[in-house]
Image (tube, helix red, strand yellow):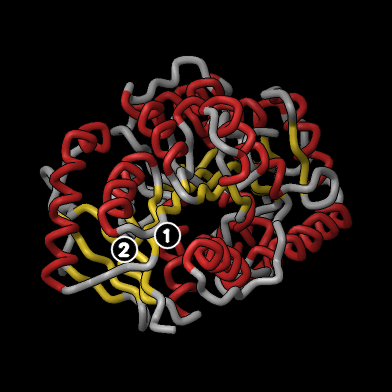
């Protein structure tokens, strides 16, 4: 059989962009790591993404079999909300590049709703299967938090693509069920494949050493990692810290940047001031992705207070580092976190309930260690080699590739 080749469409999430700033986050990490792992398995991957302001080369090679190809569509600094109008232009430019290079693909894999429109058109024109991973869903986001607004076109496109895609990859049973319930998707076309984690980067380190490198003292550390935006529920972490009655000092570390100026950051800082916590919260800002293991390992607990998470990569990264997680029971978090074994899931957005679970962990070295060890063991089944093998097999069903994986999620 000839060499397998896949086109990834990730229009607004360049895999070379640093996570934690703007709209860059878990999707960027997912696309890059999945492509690299599939490349290591022998597949040629071309990732088509939109040209943005800090692009140095139109084509960037990452790994032996993976290329990132920047396509002009709209102004480089255009906001994600403006990109729908530029989808035909992006599609045209992808087709031009493909024809100039004489490229053919066995499968098109789209990431996010904007990309899925392009992927549908591209796959139909080539007569090859279309696989789509939505990462988040408009109707779920709008249900999860009052005031959450999405583009009117988004749920329409999501529903249309679900109806035509050959395979939809969902991160959790919750996401799959929402596709069927809210969009009328065919459950038989939806496959469960988890997100993955780099087990060599996110791994247990000596806590004392990690804290020393970050200049921390003996305080108990509650860690938040992610974009600072309302949907992430950072106010709940502030309220949780305000409820805690620990004899030991407690510090909150917020790692990540605001997605919309400093509006949400300012709101959270004001809340911290009102709760007399200004001196106990460190707003670290964005850090390099490879530095994140230091923060996870320095922490006693990683708190994920989101209103909605399609998967919850931060929780998985923390568990891979052996750090217990306390999180809201939403979306894919209940699939990753095993309540009482690797951390705690809270069904209500109640600071008292969060504070009780956090205090229980930080007051018992034995509990902290057992939760951390169970978390690492759980994460070891979600390394990128396993996840990529499962995705390869989804392609194989559609294309006739030989299968790779014995894993079932």
User: Toward the viewer: 319 or 240?
Assistant: 319
In percent of width and height, residue 19 lies at 40, 54
Q: Quadrant of the C terminus?
A: bottom right
* Residue depicted at x 67% and y 29%: 240
User: Toward the viewer: 169 or 259?
Assistant: 169
In percent of width and height, residue 56 lies at 15, 67
- Is residue 226 left or right of 79 when viewed as pictured? right
Is disc 2 placed on a helix, strand or loop?
strand
Q: Residues within 10 Å of mark 1 (few under 14, many from 20)?
A: many
In percent of width and height, residue 271 lies at 50, 22
Residue 144 placement: quadrant: top right
Up/down of 261 relative to 215, above or below: above
- Is residue 389 left or right of 262 when viewed as pictured? right
Up/down of 69 relative to 130, above or below: below
* Residue depicted at x 19% and y 57%: 94
Which of the numbered marks, if any, corresponds to residue 31? 1
Query: Do the numbered discs 2 and 1 sit on residues whose CB atoms are within 8 Å?
Result: yes
Is disc 1 placed on a helix, strand or loop?
helix
Which of the numbered marks, if any, corresponds to residue 47? 2
């Amino acid at each position: 059989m000839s060499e397998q080749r896949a086109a990834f469409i990730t229009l607004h999430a360049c895999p070379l962009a640093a996570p934690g700033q703007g709209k860059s986050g878990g999707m960027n990490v997912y696309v890059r790591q999945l492509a690299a792992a599939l490349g290591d398995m022998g597949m040629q991957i071309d990732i088509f993404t939109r040209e943005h302001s800090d692009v140095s080369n139109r084509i960037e090679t990452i790994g032996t079999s993976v290329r990132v190809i920047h396509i002009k569509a709209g102004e480089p600094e255009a906001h994600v909300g403006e990109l729908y109008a530029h989808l035909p232009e992006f599609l045209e430019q992808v087709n031009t590049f493909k024809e100039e290079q004489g490229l053919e693909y066995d499968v098109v894999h789209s990431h996010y709703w904007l990309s899925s429109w392009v992927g549908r058109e591209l796959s139909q024109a080539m007569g090859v299967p279309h696989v789509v991973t939505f990462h988040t869903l408009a109707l779920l986001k709008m249900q999860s938090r009052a005031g959450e607004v999405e583009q009117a076109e988004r749920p329409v496109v999501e529903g249309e693509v679900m109806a035509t895609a050959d395979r939809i990859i969902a991160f959790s049973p919750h996401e799959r069920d929402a596709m069927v319930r809210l969009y009328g998707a065919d459950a038989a076309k939806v496959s469960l494949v988890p997100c993955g984690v780099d087990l060599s980067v996110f791994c247990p380190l000596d806590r004392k050493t990690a804290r020393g490198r970050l200049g921390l003292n003996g305080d108990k550390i509650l860690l938040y990692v992610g974009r600072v935006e309302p949907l992430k529920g950072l106010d709940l972490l502030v309220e949780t810290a305000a409820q805690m009655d620990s004899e030991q000092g407690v510090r909150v570390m917020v790692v990540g940047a605001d997605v919309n100026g400093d509006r949400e950051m300012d709101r959270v800082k004001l809340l911290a001031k009102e709760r007399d916590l200004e001196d106990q919260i460190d707003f670290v800002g964005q850090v390099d992705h490879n530095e994140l293991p230091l923060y996870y390992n320095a922490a006693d607990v990683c708190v994920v207070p989101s209103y909605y998470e399609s998967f919850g990569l931060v929780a998985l990264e923390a568990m891979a580092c052996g750090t217990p997680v306390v999180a809201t029971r939403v979306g894919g978090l209940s699939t990753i976190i095993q309540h009482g074994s690797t951390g705690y899931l809270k069904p209500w957005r109640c600071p008292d309930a969060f504070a009780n679970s956090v205090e229980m962990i930080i007051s018992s070295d034995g509990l902290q260690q057992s939760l951390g060890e169970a978390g690492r063991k759980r994460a070891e089944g979600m390394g990128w080699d396993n996840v990529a093998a499962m995705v390869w097999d989804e392609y194989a069903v559609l294309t006739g590739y030989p299968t790779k994986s014995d894993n079932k999620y």
